[in-house]
Amino acid sequence: VIARAFAAAVLVVAAGCAGARREAARDPSSTDGRVVHVAAVAVDVAPGGSADLVVVLTIDRGFHIQSDAPSRPNYIPTRVRIDPRAEGDHVVLGDPRYPPAVLFALADEPIRTFEGEVAVRVGVRVEGGASEGERTLRGAVRYQACTATSCLFPREEPFTAKVRVARGPAG
Amino acid sequence: MGPPYIGDAAPEFELVDQSGERVRLRDLRGSYVVLHFGTSWCPFCTEELPNLQRLASDYAGKGVRVLLVDVKEGDAPFKEYSTRLPLSFPLLRDTSGEAAAKYAPPRALAAIADRAQVPIAANLLLDKEGKIRFFTLVDTARFDAKLVALRRDLDALLAEHP
């Protein structure tokens, strides 16, 4: 389903799957609560084509964040949002697709979290009438992080993503 | 005011509860006080909340008061937190986080810049003179959601000084 507003997706969580648990985490470096580092991979799409934009969240080692479908409604879900202004330029965004969650042991109730490096995919469709050129999309990731010994206040991390529209083999 | 370690006087605060009543910590001298810092979104606090209510009920007739300080939240989360369970004790609103920050031991979790975060999910027991007799920060490896250690120390205090 293609969303025309800020995208937010809830996918089936396969708890315990190693997909979200790649040990590429950074060691904690910041003291300001910024423990998730966000980067988006540029994507090439031909007019009339589609591709996935990949937003990579790199979570500091020792931290976990609530998954996109947390274990309780009062927990803060991880959300990747992209400003929909690009749609006016024949670029249409889909709902984010999140990887499976990782279980974090908490008392009697393991909770669904993300750790390490997490790739969130957002479908990008470029309409046939789009002009060639590069678009810069602006987005943000909202998350709430904890370690085994503390929880940090929720925060939002901005990012930009490039969509290059070009006729050719891509797309 | 000294650093908030066991044996020190509990840092003073005055906050408003879910009924709009002002609560001053010093006014509770003469009672044992169980003090918990939490937020609506904190998983550790969520696990502890029903056990905190259970403790409040079990010790209600023994001169024990329970206070929950909600740290740096807006109106909607505070309301949700205060109505999630029927609470028999005050849920205090620490909007700025100043009260919570006073309870961050200076060298605990030094990497965290916002000291109001440090005591989230912490449990303290204050004696009748307002001195800290029990203080635990979160430790997942020994997460005591059922407040077993706190109850043990509270029982010991009550046996010694009813």
Image (spheres, rainbow, N blue to C red):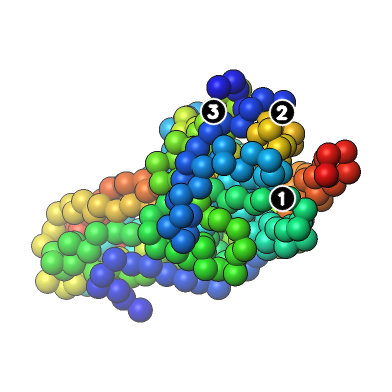
Frontmost of labels 1 and 3 is: 1
Out of B35 and A37, give the one closest to the viewer. Answer: B35
- How far, Cα to Cα, is label 1 from label 2? 18 Å
Where is residue A17 shown, x and y percent of the image? Answer: 66, 61
Q: Which label belongs to residue B6? A: 2
**Residue carrying label 3:** B111
> What's under tag 1, amino acid-wise?
Val
Q: How dense is the environment of label 2, judged by Cα within 10 Å: few (below 14), some, or many (20 and up)? A: some
Frontmost of labels 2 and 3 is: 2
Q: Which label belongs to residue B64? A: 1
Outermost residue to the bottom? A1
Residue A5 is left or right of residue A32, and the answer is left
Sequence-wise, the earlier of marks 2 and 3 is 2
SS under mark 3: loop
Quadrant of image for the N terminus of chain A: bottom left
- How far, Cα to Cα, is label 1 from label 3? 34 Å
Please report contact status of discs 1 and 3: CB closer than 8 Å, yes or no: no
Chain letter, disc 1 residue: B
Rendered view: B118 above or below B92: above
Sequence-wise, the earlier of marks 1 and 3 is 1
Query: Does the rendering let one see residue B63?
Result: yes
SS under mark 1: strand
Total marks placed = 3
Please report contact status of discs 2 and 3: CB closer than 8 Å, yes or no: no
Q: Do marks 1 and 3 share a chain?
A: yes
Out of B93 and A32, give the one closest to the viewer. Answer: B93
Residue A61 is left or right of residue A11, and the answer is right
